[in-house]
Image (cartoon, rainbow, N blue to C red):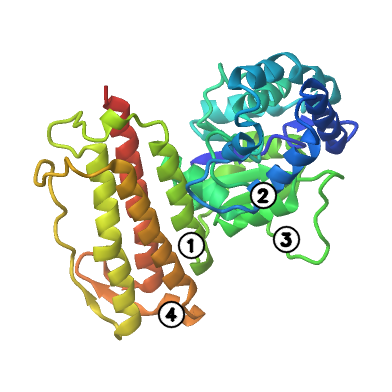
Amino acid sequence: MIRAVFLDLDDTLLHYPQGAMKFVGQYLAMLAENFPELPNLAQQVVGNVRHMMEDISPVRQNQSFYGDLFSGKLSQETLQAFYRTQYPTLQSLTKPDPVASQLIDYLIKKGYMVVIATNPIYPQVATQARLRWAGIDPQVVDLARLTHAENSHFTKPHPQYYEEICAHLDIEPYEVVMVGDNWEHDIVAGASAGMRTFWIENDVHPKPSHVNNLADGQGRLQDFYQCVTEQDWLKALTPKPIEASHIVPRLMGNMGALWGTLEPIEDRFWHQRPYQDEWTPLEVVLHLYEHEYEVQRPRLERIVEHDNPFLKPENEPFQPCDRDVSDQIGWDVARAFVAEREKTVAFLLSLPAEVWQRPARHSIYGPTTFLEMASLTSRHDHLHIRQLCQTIGQCE
C-alpha cells in the first residue's frame, strides 16, 4: 500500500520559463555581487556543490560543504540576510505549476505523507522560498519532510538520498511514489531505491531513448493530479519486491538518518532517561552498535558459510539500567557503529549475486533467505531511529 508521495520541486512544482540554468546563473551572479570580498565565489560554489553530489558519507551534512567555503569569512547572519532580502528577487524567473498546491492539499487530506524531495543542495531558507513561489507555504502545509542542505547527508541521484528520507519517516521505499521530471535523479534513482515512480514529462530533462521505461506512469503534473483524484491510481499500485541492489543504499541511508537525528542532540541528553523503563539515547546507539557486530553481520556470515543453517534467536538486549555506561561518550559510540556498518557494507559488496538467495531457517521467521535477513537489518535500524527520535524529543 502506498503511504507517501515524494514530489520533486524544480521543474515539477515550480517551472522556469527561461530555463533553470538562467535562474542558477542569476543566483551565482547575485552571490558574487553581494560578497565581493570572496573572490571567485561563483566558481567555488559550483565546485563545492559538485563535491557534495559526489560524496556519499552518511556523517557529513550537505550544509557543511558551504561551511567549508564561508567559514570564518561570512557570518550565518549575513548569509541569512542575503537569502531573506536578495534571493527573493529571483522569483520573477519562476512560475508555479497551476495544480501544485491543489495536489498537495488533496494528498494530505487523503492521509498520504507528502515529502518535497528536492535535491538538497540549497540551504533551508532558499528551498523554503522556492516552495512558497510554487504556491505552497511550508509554515502552513503539513509536509512530512522538506529536504534541504541542512537536513540531508546525500543528494540525488544516489538512492541513499531516498533511503535517508524513508528512515526518518519510518516507511519502506515500496510504500512510496516518487514524482519528478528528471529521469536520472527522480525516476532511475527512485526506482533503484525500490519506489514506484511517475515521470513528469517536459523538454528540460527528456527520457533517454535507450533505457527501459522504469516509470509506472508519466505525463504532466496535471495528468498525475487526475490519476490520483479521478482514477485512484495510488491505491492500484502494488509494492515492488525487495531486491539485493536495494540493501546497501538502504543500510547507508539509515546511517544518514541516524546521524541527522543525533546532530541536534545536546551533550547532557546522552545519558538522560525520559522514560523510566526505556533506554537513554546513548543506550539506543550502543545497542545498535553491539547488535551490528554481535548479531546482524554474524547472522549473514553464517548463511554464507553454511548450507541452509538454523538461525537461533539472538539473546535479549541489555535492559535499561542493566549496565553502567556513564563513562562512555555518545558520539564515540555513534562513530563506532558507523564503522561497524561500513564493515557490513564491505562484506555485502564482496558477495556474488547468487548468495542473496541462499536459504536459511529462523526460529521465529521460519524459512528465509540471505536477502530477507539483510532486509531485517534495515528494519531494525528503522525501529531504533524512531525510538531515538522520540527519546531525544523528551529530553530536557
Circle 3 — which element?
loop
Q: Residue visible at 79% across and 33% down? A: 39
Q: Position of residue 144 (x, y in %)?
A: 50, 31
The first of marks 4 and 3 along the sequence is: 3
Q: Position of residue 268 (x, y in %)?
A: 26, 29
Q: Distance between the residues labelled 2 and 1?
A: 21 Å
**Badge 1 is on which residue?**
248
Check contact, mark 4 vs mark 3: CB within 8 A.
no
What crowding class fits label 4: few (fewer than 14 Cα within 10 Å), some (14-19), or many (20 or more)?
some
Task: Give the number of the mark in front: 2 or 1.
Answer: 2
Three-letter amino acid code at the position of disc 3: Asn
Three-letter amino acid code at the position of disc 4: Val
| Residue 25 horizontal side relative to residue 228, left or right | right
**Badge 3 is on which residue?**
213
Nearer to the camera, 27 or 108: 27
The first of marks 2 and 3 along the sequence is: 2
Task: Give the number of the mark in front: 4 or 1.
Answer: 1
Q: Residue visible at 50% across and 55% down? A: 239
Which circle marks residue 355 in the picture? 4
Circle 2 — which element?
helix
Q: Distance between the residues labelled 4 and 3?
A: 28 Å
